[in-house]
Image (cartoon, rainbow, N blue to C red):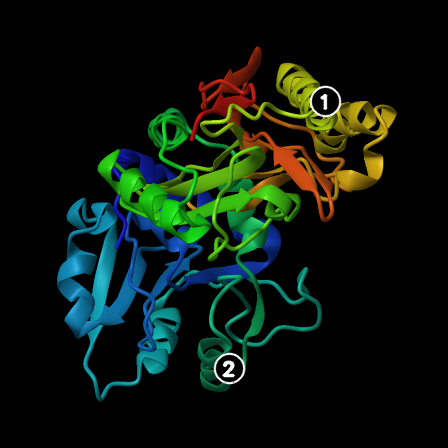
Amino acid sequence: MSTHSIPADRHATRIARAQAALPAEDASALLLGVGADLQYLTGYGAHELERLTMLVVPAIGRATLIAPRLEMALAQACTASEARLIDLAPWEETDDPFALVAAQLDASDSRPEIQLGALGGTWGRLGGLLVSDRLWATFLLRLQATLPDAAFGLASTVMTTMRAVKDAEEIELLRRAALAADRVVAQIAAGPLVGRTEAEVSKEVLDRLVTEGHDEGDFAIVASGPNSASPHHGPGPRVIAAGEPIVLDIGGRLEGYWSDTTRTLWVTGDADIRPTDEFTKLFDTLHGAQEAQRAAVRPGLAAAELDAVGRKMIAKAGYGENFIHRTGHGTGLDGHEDPYIVSSNEAPLVAGNVFSIEPGIYIEGKFGARIEDLVACGVNGVDELNVSSRDLYVVRG
């Protein structure tokens, strides 16, 4: 279970903002299961279980956290509960938690007088209910059976806009996570690497992320030699050799907030096998594109325009077909969240957005490279959360 140090008054503001946004969505309540939305409003990083945990947030009145009795001590310890911002409703093993959700909605005086809503159709007595986007299907089906008078929509219509703009405390937590990941990159680059398997190095990364302050290490891509041309390579039994690149993409959660950084290494070995001219050209192109994209960040710039800044440079150098993914993704309580830095997203960046800038060039069957930083969009431009060198790490290994 992840916790974080966001103060109670911030959670109070978030809950109030979520409630205030519901009428505009023609909705009477949010129903949030385990996940980042629940943690954002309450500070509760609940365990994902087959037992229902659900925060019921009516448009008017107090929110109630429904949770299994055996999880209640953890629920009571969350920021919103300790500050008495929410009520708690425990359920026993033989209780029906979906009936408890229905009872909370019946007890609420929050139902707006709405006949037709954004979700479509004439709504029944309970109106629209916005549920977590990633709520398990089994939970949603039980809710629908228990609440046949309700129409269901996605909580993201309210929560995405709120969560996409980070406050000062969130940005500092993301910065701490980024700097911890930077330290791990330096430690791994110092070796040893040659003669070890990708899987062995990956395990070391995950352990070091925890040592450097993360709650847990969540991923550690160690893609060596031809595997570096696979952006989401799964570290395996391949033995790292001298005279080849390694794409090192690592991250995890620190107080619930994610780190995510990528650096590219070239391992020379004892024979001092230096980077080839072909690889140097590829990497220099990538480095220039990523640098230009970081420099371009500012409020009002469309996400699509930021993607285009680097993509045009990479295409001009002849690698256009080898940049096969979007430039980046938002990061916060989820590793991937809004805003997405992709050519189809015309939405403008706003101050407080935090996202990755991670162009890559991949030559199938040969090698690839990627450089990734987390950045915040500040009022006056980019605020770089990762600060380690973006140069090619030429190391003995």
Foreground pick, 353 / 311 = 311
Where residue 317 sits: x, y (%)?
Answer: 83, 24
Foreground pick, 275 / 64 = 275
Please name the amino acid that badge 1 sits on.
Answer: Asp
Where residue 171 sits: x, y (%)?
Answer: 41, 27
Q: Residue furthest bottom?
A: 94
In the image, is residue 357 above or below residue 103? above
The residue to which callout 2 is attached is 141
Where residue 63 sits: x, y (%)?
Answer: 32, 57
In the image, is residue 123 above or below residue 326? below
Q: Residue furthest top?
A: 380
Where residue 139 sits: x, y (%)?
Answer: 44, 77
Please name the amino acid that badge 2 sits on.
Answer: Leu
The residue to which callout 1 is attached is 277
Mark 2 packing: few (<14 Cα in 10 Å), some, or many (20+)? Answer: few
Q: CA distance from mark 2 to mark 1?
A: 58 Å
Foreground pick, 268 / 313 = 268
Quarter in which the N terminus is drawn? bottom left
Q: In the drawing, does residue 314 fall left or right of residue 108?
A: right
At 38% from the left edge and 26% from the top edge, which residue is drawn?
Answer: 186
- 2 and 1 marks in contact (CB < 8 Å): no
| Residue 353 appears anywhere in the view | no
Which of the marked residues, 2 or 1, is nearer the chain's N terminus? 2
